Image (cartoon, rainbow, N blue to C red):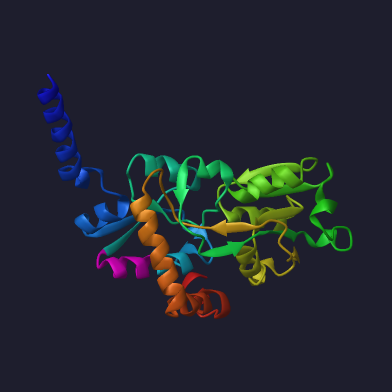
Amino acid sequence: MIKRCLCAVLLGVVGFLYGAPANAGAIDDAVQRGVLRVGTTPTYVPFEMTDKRGQIIGFEIDLLQAMSKALDIELEMVPVPYTELLPGLMQKQYDLIGSGMTVTQQRNLKLNFSDSFIIVGQTVLLHPDLAGKVSSIEDLDDAGYRVVAIEGTTGELAARRFLGAARLRTFPTPEEGVRQVVEGKADAFIHDAPYNLIAIAKPENSSLLALEQPFTYEPLAFGLKKGDYDSLNWINHFLNQVAQDGTYDRLYDKWFKDTAWMAEVY
């Protein structure tokens, strides 16, 4: 009996060792496949967006391109609505999430996040009629104000947290949210600072006012399935490498300091 038990244990160990590739992480799977598949919602300027040719481009996309190059494989972006990013990952539609996703405690219960690759925060765009009336997020917390945010985002969470008295509506895309304020159907739009800075620079939005000081602290990171620590380890080392070799600074300047890319989108 003891001998049979020992054999069973040994067989289990051998099966674990030789069966390890079957339980390989997302990065190992991508390397074996030759393609890194990434779920994204390409509406978050300038992190991921669709250009005039229908190609998905942006700061985060370039980071993922550099990641795929380091792995010596191709990159495939899988566009899905933001609220479907997590279900799609669980269903193995892609290897990881790369969609300007903020690390939150609630999301961290469902995902493992890489180290953050940038810190952003929520800011406010205002209808011009609010000039001199609203100078802070606290001023907006009133039942007389109509606020819009993007559904499923930390902008919506921030609006619900800080503006409990205001009337909140959500929309699928930031373009729709901004349009509501421009057309006077809403008083304020809550969204990430990088997007709002670019949105207000467009001629059709030039009448809007901005509260440019972020009122939240939000690290953005890549999301993977729980327990995929090998992939997290690789991605974190990759992020450290590009931060040290100048790749990150070059991409940051391209998307946040230069405006040449805007001609490809607008």
Q: Nearer the viewer, residue 176 or 246?
A: 246
- Decide if residue 78 is in sight here: no
Residue 21, image x, y percentages: 20, 47
Total marks drawn? 0
Q: Farthest residue in the right direction? A: 132
- Decide if residue 102 is in sight here: yes
State which quarter of the image contains the N terminus.
top left
Horizontal relation, residue 138 to residue 45: left or right: right
Q: Farthest residue in the front direction? A: 2
Q: Assess whether residue 65 is covered by the magenta stretch.
A: yes
Horizontal relation, residue 113 to residue 12: left or right: right
Residue at image point 25% right, 59% down: 35
Residue at image point 41% right, 43% down: 226
Q: Indicate whether 95 appears above or below 115.
A: above
Residue 103, image x, y percentages: 55, 51
Q: Assess whether residue 250 is covered by the magenta stretch.
A: no
Q: Indicate whether 11 appears above or below 251.
A: above
Q: Indicate whether 258 appears above or below 122.
A: below
Q: Farthest residue in the top direction? A: 1
Horizontal relation, residue 186 to residue 117: left or right: right
Residue at image point 42% right, 79% down: 245
Q: Nearer the viewer, residue 170 or 77?
A: 77
Main structural element of the magenta stretch: helix, strand or loop?
helix
Question: Splitting the image into 4 quarters, where does residue 212 fall?
Answer: bottom right
Residue 32, image x, y percentages: 20, 56
Residue at image point 57% right, 58% down: 219
Residue 159, image x, y percentages: 70, 47
Q: State which region is magenta.
A: 64-73
